[in-house]
Amino acid sequence: MKPLVLALLLASATPALADEVLWDRHGVPHIIADSEAGAFKGFGWAQAASHGNILLKMYGESRARAAEYWGPEHAALDRYLIAHDVPERAQAWYKAQAPQMRANLDAFAAGINAWMAAHPDHVPAELRRVLPITGVDVMAHAHRLMQFLYVAPMGRMLSPPSRPGPTGLGDDGGSNGWAVAPRRTVEGAAMLLANPHLPWAPSPLTYYEAQITAPGYNVYGATQVGLPVLRFAFNNELGFTNTVNNMLGATRYALVADCYGYRLDGKRLAYRMVKKAMLIRQSDGSLKRETWAQRHSVHGPVFEVEGKPVAVRVAGLDRPGVLQAYLDMGKAKDFNGFESALKRLQIPSFNIVYADRAGHVFHISNGILPRHKTGGSHEYWSGLVPGDRSALISTEIEPYDSLPKALDPPGGFVQNANDVPWVNTVPRVLKPADFPAHVAATEPMSLRAQMSARLLMGDDRLSFAEFQRRKLTTTSLMAERLKGPLLAASAGSADPDVRAARDLLAGWDNRFEADSRAAILFEEWARRFAGPGLSDEGNYTKPWTLEDPLNTPAGIRDDAQATAMLAAAAQAVKARHGRIDPRYGDVSRFAAGEALSVPGHGGAGPLGLFRTISWGPWKDGTRVPVAGETWVNLIQFSTPMKAIATMSYGNSSQPGTPHRSDQLAALGEKRFRQLWLTRDEVERNLERRDVY
């Protein structure tokens, strides 16, 4: 196979049409253009075709005009974005782009508009109110997604300290990422896993798979709908993925009220008042204008939280280059080029995991992080910070060298599963004491993250097939660690439910497979032992420690209590399913917006499952995913390159699409698609061709 950089242009004797989209039979667009802006236009065209409804909905939201388009239930988000000056900043950020990037953003918007004009019935009339899309809208959406969904989501920023609010990603925001160096592989070629876990319901977090080929830009990968660049990508020379981290790019300040102002350094300051307005659509279709005076302190916009003023300060609002950074990362040909894009510190958040053909592997806990000269821990800055001291107001960001990272570590791999960076490889190479205390917490490493590291540690060489097998394992680390102690703790019980449960668990292989008979019972017990979120360490004998991060927490503190929990779990499973041993895949089903469902496997990450599925609530004794295992991509930088993937919920969300549930069977059977990287391969698997 020719290098990916040339493949689509040279692999076929048939000359490529300029500016076309080749749709393969899985609904993946392969965009071929004779200019960079042309490729952006094709990507906008493709996204409109595959995800038109959510695309227009999220652009309306990111404009901060959702209440105007669709009613008062959207007003709170509009107010939050307007308070943060998102509409005005989007204009300024658009103007701050290099001329080529402005042309790219305009072209992406033009592609959306062109598809919508050619297919007037593609989306409902109420969504068409958002049209036409502009390059400023594309910038506004990137700004909203990065700064106000990931870094400073409304639910978390405006929640009381005693009741932490949602992140905006839900409880299911997460991902896995691996990079394995050549010396740890059978073929002597680096391997990379991209494995985000965000919600399955169509939303601004929905992933979209594509290949984009233009002069100087030839990449395959995925991104979130609405973004004009690939965030999870590979070319012939390198690849990278992202996982959500807990870097604190936003700070909440508890202001001390003083009449109509606030106290700072012993003085009363008046709020800066900015007149704001919005339109809200009423039930009869009329528009009602709402105006207010938005308060600002020197920290940032001010909101009421439980009747008290709280200011929100977001770092990096003077750094408009996130889209350019991802574009340049995808264009890079080596690690130096890739890192130069990162060093500009334009990407507000995310762990980034990287591998390349030259053999480098790399992880960084990346972000635009306020530099706090007064010190303070991660925990301190994640709470409500006193707002009456100017010394606590950060005006700088931490330099690139202050961010935890590992390049080509001795263990031959890097990994991240949303854990703090201190165990990004084994043996460990990072020490918390070497970094500012607010960079990352020294909090317990999740069991999913421990399983991630355990699957790669050692000195054995992995084949590409073994790389896949380890990715797909459904063994629960929590079961491996606690099943033996639980059987010992309950050995003397005469309770028939406990005896039946013990017999079932004793014969179980600790895997969450479709045919597993004890997995539901163990999960039910685990949610009692470790709490509904499976992360409470109170019932363990030994808590987690950084000194022994892959073997703790461990042990059962109270045998009698654990036994009582087992009895209660057995009774709950029988009450819900009519038996103690339901087949896992009969009650846990993979489904994605269609009547079709297939037997499921995998489960909650806190159970120590690397094959991560966040199941929704039980309904009539069954459940379906709400998140997990979305875009799953494994590549090896061999010659020829090996590249496989699944998009669990399919590559389109439009009503009536054949590509919403067409990959569920492969998901259930643990099969991956061979990615079609050359024009010849795409032509042999062509569904249709669009010239735009």
Image (cartoon, rainbow, N blue to C red):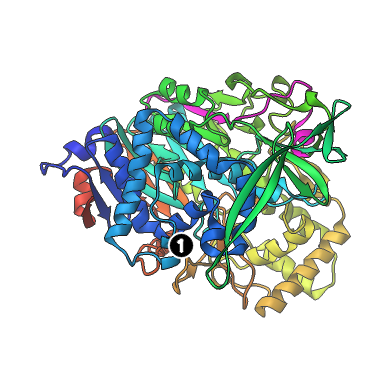
Q: Is residue 651 visible?
A: no
Picture coordinates of residue 455, whole percent (x, y):
56, 41
Tell me the quarter of the image containing the N terminus.
Answer: top left
Depth order, front residue of 565/437: 437
Residue 388 against residue 399 in the figure, above or below = below
Q: Position of residue 575 (x, y in %)?
A: 72, 78
Residue 381 lies in the magenta stretch: yes
The front one of 502 and 622 is: 622
Q: Who is closer to the viewer here, 339 or 526?
A: 339
Q: Quadrant of residue 247?
A: top right
The residue that mark 1 highlights is 668
Residue at x 39%, y 28% (from the top left corner): 98
Q: Nearer the viewer, residue 283 or 420?
A: 283
Going by the image, does 107 lie left or right of 311?
Answer: left
Name the image quarter holding residue 5. Answer: top left
SS category of the residue bearing label 1: helix
* 589 is higher (above) or lower (below) than 193: below
In the rendered view, does 331 fall on the left or right side of 591? left
Q: Position of residue 634 (x, y in %)?
A: 42, 43
Tell me if residue 331 comes above or below residue 152 in the rendering: above
The crowd level at tag 1 (other Cα within 10 Å; few <14, some 14-19, many 20+) is many
Range covered by the magenta-colored residues: 357-383
Visible residue check, residue 601:
yes
Rendered view: 601 above or below 142: below
Please report the residue visible at 64 percent of the width from the left and 72 percent of the height from the top.
Answer: 581
- Magenta run includes residue 266: no
- Image coordinates of residue 342 in percent, x first then y, are 50, 26
Residue shown at 43% from the left, 35% from the top: 191
